[in-house]
Image (cartoon, rainbow, N blue to C red):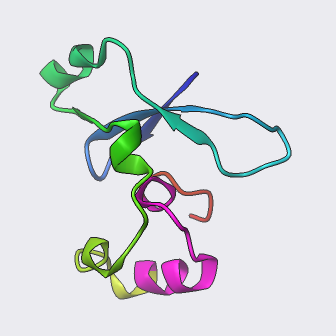
């Protein structure tokens, strides 16, 4: 398992790569995630990250970030938060 970190959102998550030829990771729950909370970090669950991305997730993005989303079309919230296209 890999630990993913989104500094802008103070967010950590877990992921496993099932196929080394695929970009999308499989999000997994982080065991012992409480250790991140004293540092002010939130731990995202696999269920949260696997939500389909929709318009309600986009209002806080900059115009440039919205263009990136429109171009790359990530399908899940986790693909937006921990993306490969930055």
Q: Which residues are magenta?
A: 65-80
User: Where 44 sits versus 49, above or below?
Assistant: above
Residue 61 higher or lower than 34, as above or below: below
Task: Write down the quadrant of residue 62 in the picture.
Answer: bottom left
Where is residue 65 drawn, in percent x and y? 43, 78
* Nearer to me, 37 or 86: 37
Residue 47's spot in the image, x, y percent?
Answer: 37, 43
Question: Is residue 6 in view?
Answer: no
Res. 55 image quadrant: bottom left
Tally of marks: 0
Of residues 32 and 38, the one nearer the viewer is 32
Name the side, left or right, on which 64 lies relative to 58: right
**Residue found 23% across the figure and 74% down from its top:** 60
Residue shown at 78% from the left, 49% from the top: 22
Answer whether residue 15 is magenta in the image: no
| Position in image of residue 59 (x %, y %) | 24, 80
Image coords of residue 4 (percent x, y): 47, 36
Residue at x 86%, y 46% (from the top left corner): 21
């Amino acid at each position: 398992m890999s630990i993913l970190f989104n500094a802008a959102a103070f967010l950590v998550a877990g992921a496993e790569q099932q196929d080394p030829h695929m970009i999308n990771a499989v999000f997994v729950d982080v065991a012992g995630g409480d250790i991140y909370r004293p540092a002010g970090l939130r731990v995202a669950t696999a269920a949260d990250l696997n939500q389909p991305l929709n318009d309600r997730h986009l209002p806080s993005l900059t115009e440039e970030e919205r263009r990136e989303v429109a171009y790359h079309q990530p399908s899940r919230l986790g693909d937006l938060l921990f993306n490969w296209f930055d």
